[in-house]
Image (cartoon, rainbow, N blue to C red):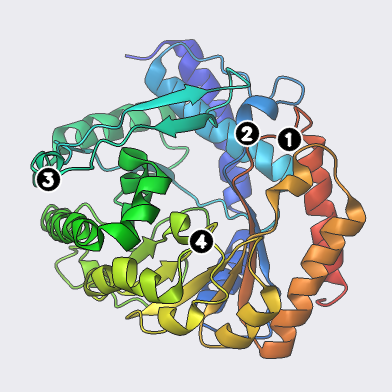
Amino acid sequence: MFCENDKKIIGELARQYREIANLEVNQERKQRLSDVNDLKTGLRPSVWLDELPWHEMDIDGKLKLHCQDEFARGMEWFFRTTLFRWEYFQADMVVENFYPISKSYSSNGNGMEIHEQIKETDAKNNIVSHAYEDSLSTEEDLKKLHPTVITPHPERDEANMAKARELLGEILPVRLMGTPVYYAPWDEISMLRGVEPVLYDMADRPEFLHEIMRRYTENQKNIMLQMEQYNLLENDPLSIHCTPAYNTSLPPVEADGKVRLKNVWFRAMAQMFSTVSPAMHEEFELDYMRPLMEMCGLVYYGCCEPLDNKISILKSIPNLRKIGVSPWANIEKSGGQIGSSYVYARKPNPAQVAVNVDAEAVEKEIEDTIKVCLRYGCPYEFVLKDISTVSYKPGNIIEWNRIVQKTIDKYYK
């Protein structure tokens, strides 16, 4: 099926990948990442990098694809980006000794369509500016919402597994993987309506927003149960939205091998609620999310929104394990409230790598976090993400990682 040149390219890359995957350092890192997610303290924090502007990252043509077949090109991209990260800024990344294939499924959506205008500054960048039209402003619009139906495609899984095995031969095993639960309703609702109409309606038409959330919550529960029914969930994912997922706290999968909701992470956030009061955050977000979160084994909450004045209400989340501490959060207040009860998931400011790297600013940001987490006994991690640009200077990421590791070395041997 595949030409000999495609097989040769994938084979060479897979052998390099396997050599790295067999290094003991991967197991050492996995253990430390798991220990942090299991709330063990006193450990060196991990450093992960994700959501990279890959179109700006190439060095010496190492990210250029050469395969002809589209499936082979997808595998080639996976191997090239992994090898690239390992060579230039591996931080605490883990390379697993298998090639992952995502389980295939489709959905019929929920009946809503996003209407928007976009503006871009770089045609190669998928980060663009959005202006959304309000498509969910009336009772008539609400009638468009319908239950989502999930359809698994095991035949595609079998075909994809066969293709991967043909390309890899005996070099690497292939693993079919499901997904953890990721749910951020206000990200979608804000794209259907725009942010301002939602904020106004919290005061002017609260019952209308409640009806939206009631329907979204009912639909999400239905989706989660379908994902469980069709065995599309993953209890051991490579990550949960850019952060380490390794742990020993989730209940083990039962003897039948079926992954259930109690075996997986639930990932949630409400980024547009940055300026919303704790009371409204609870009323319009957490009151609806808690029953869904309770269905899963562990919960990771928060992304770009500052949560330092809302941690008290987050503590009511069932199975909460990890809290996002964004660049705009007060790190001292966050540390004092998180303590040793949750993972302090620190997000350094991606602006530090956008144009030029200010070594002093990077070191201060990392050192301030280290001191806070040591003071309050927090298990913690650093995840640099949302990197929309490095101004076509991949050296910015390399330098950032060097400074961060050197800073951490001052506190951990």
CA distance for labels 4 and 2 = 25 Å
User: Where does residue 191 sit, x and y in percent of width and height?
Assistant: 36, 40
Query: In the rendered structure, are the residues bearing label 2 and label 1 in contact, judged by CB atoms less than 8 Å apart?
Result: yes
Q: Secondary structure at mark 1?
A: loop
Residue marked by disc 3: 139
Distance in Å between CA atoms under marks 1 and 4: 26 Å
Q: Looking at the picture, does residue 84 appear above or below residue 247?
A: above
First reached walking from the N terminus: tag 2 or tag 3: 2
Q: How many marks?
A: 4
Which quarter of the rendering shows the N terminus?
A: top left
Instruction: Say few, some or many: other residues with alpha carbon within 10 Å of mark 4 (under 14 / 14 to 19 / 20 or more).
Output: some
Q: Which residue is mark 4?
A: 274
Of the residues tagged 2 and 3, which is closer to the observer? 3
Residue that numbered label 1 is attached to: 390
Residue 248 seen: no
Between disc 1 and disc 4, the foreground one is 4
Query: Do callouts 2 and 3 mark residues in contact (Cβ within 8 Å)?
Result: no
Sequence order check, earlier mark of 2 and 1: 2
Which residue, as the protein is rendered here, is positioned at the far right?
360
Q: Secondary structure at mark 4?
A: loop
Asked whether, in this view, residue 381 is left or right of residue 112, the answer is right
SS state under label 2: loop
**Relative to the observer, which residue lies in front, 112 or 345?**
112
Mark 1 vs mark 3: which is more N-terminal? 3
For marks 1 and 4, the one nearer the N-term is 4
Q: Could you tell me if residue 99 is visible in this image? A: yes
**Marks 1 and 4: CB-CB under 8 Å?**
no
